[in-house]
Image: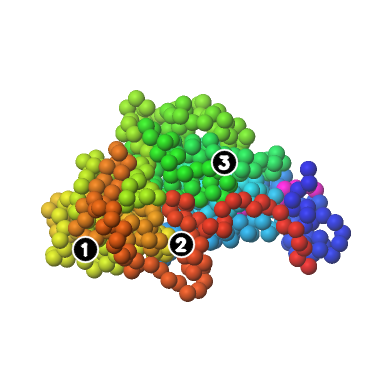
């Protein structure tokens, strides 16, 4: 077979000379002439992405595996997005990271790629890029951090930030104690140890077939991650020689397997926009309705924060993702393969549950129906989502008076005012925080509760927005309402005092206002971003709505790996 990299390196003309000579920094001649696959390691390591700061060590193990299998490994730093630090939101640059990585994979003399991600947007952006260029690819998730403890109790990073900060506001925890917990929360390298977006997307990558089976969820500090990384390096060379590409692995059946997995592990709502975007790059038909149809009736089997009690290193020791999937094997597409070329279900044969307090049996689930629920109605004609596993059961059917906020700044200015006309039956509505409005669709949908209600012991309320929320967050929170307010969606016409009706069982989200009155109202779009230059302007002008994955409209569909013109 002709390797793609040989289009750069083979021959005796000036251009092939240049390509080889500038790469001959310790590499032998046979690296360019011996039919050795050149494997890029798309590496999102960055000191400013703390969850990925260890990925250079992971990359070294991948390189060793590539060399062992007869390939040539090449470190390729790519755009890295740290969820905890980047403002206004890492989601604003997910599509930029995907586009930049796609172009670098296409432009360089490589035959395959190993994708190193961890923090929330890194695995989605890498998979979007790999889908667009469709070179042989495989993911190594960076892994969750080890569990930290405070006052003798385990800390779930993210989840316990939200919980403890609300206790401070309620007056049941001192600020000094809250700040002391800070040094205990992040115990080791790795991403969040809850079933937040990072852990969820690692599980999604494995369910899609894009990891070496059994890799997702391996703790970042566990030496077995380096062992798996070495094996993945070997596998990457095999992928090139066998010609196995992402489009052959990530079929519609693979995406439906990911939706089943999402429900069974109690995964993040953010997976919805990411899976839609990845499918869009591949040209795979996937819609919001697929999440409801396929996820409905799937039991929640993993007792993990924020939907349960335990943390990611508990899941790993209890049997890992394979043990979870073994329990729902009959719901999985038996034809969907992994990067190994074998069906996903084939690798579940030896899976066992070692701790049933962490991974529940199908006959004794944490919840019998844990799929992400897709809501529609006059408030969300394009759909909205809610995670029932993280919600209060008594609020899943609710009618309450809207208390509307036009921006995050409006929330901070008024939420704790003693004059705010709100009670525990109210519905907090936040708008102006969708893809166009913020811009970037930030993780602000899990609004803090009004101080005066916290003081009364209230710990959950119905909250509705066009924003996202962290996968580590919890509560009865309706998200991704489409179309968003900044695009003229019905959320822009809601007024404080309007009756809001939520009925998750019926999959409805409505404002109880006559259609004619709602149509006649002028939309409130104060939060609409109007950038004048750069990426933000390109993003706002071309980003799609949440129900289509919030990708850029001109990036859907694969473009392949061909580059026709020479550089000199």
The residue nearer to you, when weighing 43 against 279, is 279
Q: Residue at x 36, y 58 (%)?
A: 489
Residue furthest front in the image: 516
Q: Is residue 473 visible?
A: no
Separation of residues labelled 1 and 2 (CA atoms): 26 Å
- On the image, numbered disc 1 is attached to which residue? 415
- x and y, in percent, of residue 111 in the image: 70, 50
Q: Quadrant of residue 170?
A: bottom left
- Sequence order check: which comes first, mark 3 or mark 2? 2
SS at mark 2? helix
User: Under tag 1, what secondary structure?
Assistant: loop
Residue at numbered disc 2: 92
Residue lying furthest right in this view? 12
Residue 544 spot, x, y in % from top left: 48, 57
- Dot 3 falls on a residue whose secondary structure is loop
Q: Position of residue 282 (x, y in %)?
A: 58, 47
| Residue stretch rendered in magenta on the structure | 34-43
Residue 42 drawn in magenta: yes
Report, in whole angstroms, how far the alpha carbon at label 3 lies from the one at label 2: 25 Å
The residue where tag 3 is placed is 250
Q: Is residue 105 magenta?
A: no
The correct choice, above or below, for 416 with respect to 386 in the image is below
Rendered image coloring scheme: rainbow
- Give 181 or 291, whichever is nearer the viewer: 291
Query: How many numbered tags mark residues here?
Result: 3
Report the residue that reaches farthest toward the bottom: 532
* Magenta residues, dominant SS class: strand
- Determine crowd level at label 3: few under 14, some 14-19, many 20+ residues with C-alpha closer than 10 A: many
- The mark that comes first in sequence, 3 or 1, is 3
Vertical position of residue 407 compared to residue 313: above or below: below
Q: Residue at x 64, y 59 (%)?
A: 104
């Amino acid at each position: 077979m002709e390797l793609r990299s040989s289009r750069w390196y083979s021959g005796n003309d000036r251009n092939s000379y240049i390509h080889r000579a500038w790469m001959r920094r310790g590499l032998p001649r046979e690296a360019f002439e011996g039919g050795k696959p050149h494997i890029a390691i798309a590496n999102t390591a960055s000191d400013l992405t703390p969850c990925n700061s260890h990925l250079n060590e992971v990359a070294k193990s991948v390189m060793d595996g590539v060399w062992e299998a007869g390939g040539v490994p090449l470190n390729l730093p790519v755009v890295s997005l740290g969820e905890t630090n980047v403002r206004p939101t890492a989601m604003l640059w997910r599509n930029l990271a995907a586009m930049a990585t796609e172009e670098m994979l296409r432009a360089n003399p490589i035959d395959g790629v190993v994708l190193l991600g961890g923090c929330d947007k890194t695995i989605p952006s890498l998979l979007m890029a790999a889908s667009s260029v469709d070179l042989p690819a495989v993911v190594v998730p960076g892994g969750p951090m080890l569990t930290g403890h405070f006052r003798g109790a385990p800390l779930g990073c993210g989840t316990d930030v939200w919980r403890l900060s609300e206790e401070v506001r309620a007056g049941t925890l001192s600020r000094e104690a809250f700040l002391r917990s800070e040094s205990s929360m992040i115990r080791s390298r790795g991403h969040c140890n809850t079933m937040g977006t990072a852990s969820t997307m690692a599980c999604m990558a494995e369910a899609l077939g894009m990891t070496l089976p059994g890799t997702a969820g391996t703790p970042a500090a566990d030496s077995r991650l380096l062992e798996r990384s070495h094996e993945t390096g070997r596998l990457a060379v095999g992928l090139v020689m066998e010609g196995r590409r992402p489009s052959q692995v990530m079929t519609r059946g693979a995406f439906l397997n990911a939706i089943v997995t999402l429900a069974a592990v109690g995964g993040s709502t953010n997976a919805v926009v990411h899976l839609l975007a990845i499918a869009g790059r591949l040209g795979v038909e996937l819609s919001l309705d697929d999440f409801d149809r396929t996820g409905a009736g799937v039991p929640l089997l993993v007792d993990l924060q924020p939907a349960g009690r335990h943390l990611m290193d508990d899941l790993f020791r209890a049997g890992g993702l394979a043990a979870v999937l073994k329990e729902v094997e009959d719901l999985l597409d038996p034809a969907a393969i992994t990067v190994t070329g074998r069906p996903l279900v084939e690798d579940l044969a030896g899976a066992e549950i070692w701790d049933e307090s962490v991974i529940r049996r199908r006959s004794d689930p944490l919840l019998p129906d844990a799929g992400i629920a897709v809501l529609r109605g006059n408030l969300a004609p394009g759909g909205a989502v809610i995670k029932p596993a993280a919600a209060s059961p008594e609020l899943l059917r609710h009618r309450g008076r809207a208390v509307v906020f036009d921006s995050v700044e409006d929330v901070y200015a008024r939420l704790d005012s003693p004059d705010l006309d709100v009670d525990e039956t109210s519905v907090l509505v936040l708008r102006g925080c969708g893809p166009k409005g913020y811009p970037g669709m930030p993780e602000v949908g899990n609004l803090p509760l009004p101080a005066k209600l916290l003081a009364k012991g209230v710990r959950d309320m119905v909250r509705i927005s066009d924003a996202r929320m962290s996968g580590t967050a919890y509560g009865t929170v309706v998200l991704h309402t489409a179309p968003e307010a900044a695009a003229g969606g019905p959320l822009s016409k809601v007024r404080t005092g309007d009756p809001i009706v939520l009925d998750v069982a019926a999959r409805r989200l409505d404002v109880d206002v006559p259609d004619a009155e709602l149509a006649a109202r002028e939309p409130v779009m104060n939060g609409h971003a109007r950038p004048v230059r750069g990426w933000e302007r390109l993003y706002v002008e071309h980003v799609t709505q949440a129900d289509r994955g919030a990708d850029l409209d001109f990036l859907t569909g694969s473009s392949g790996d061909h580059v026709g013109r020479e550089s000199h």
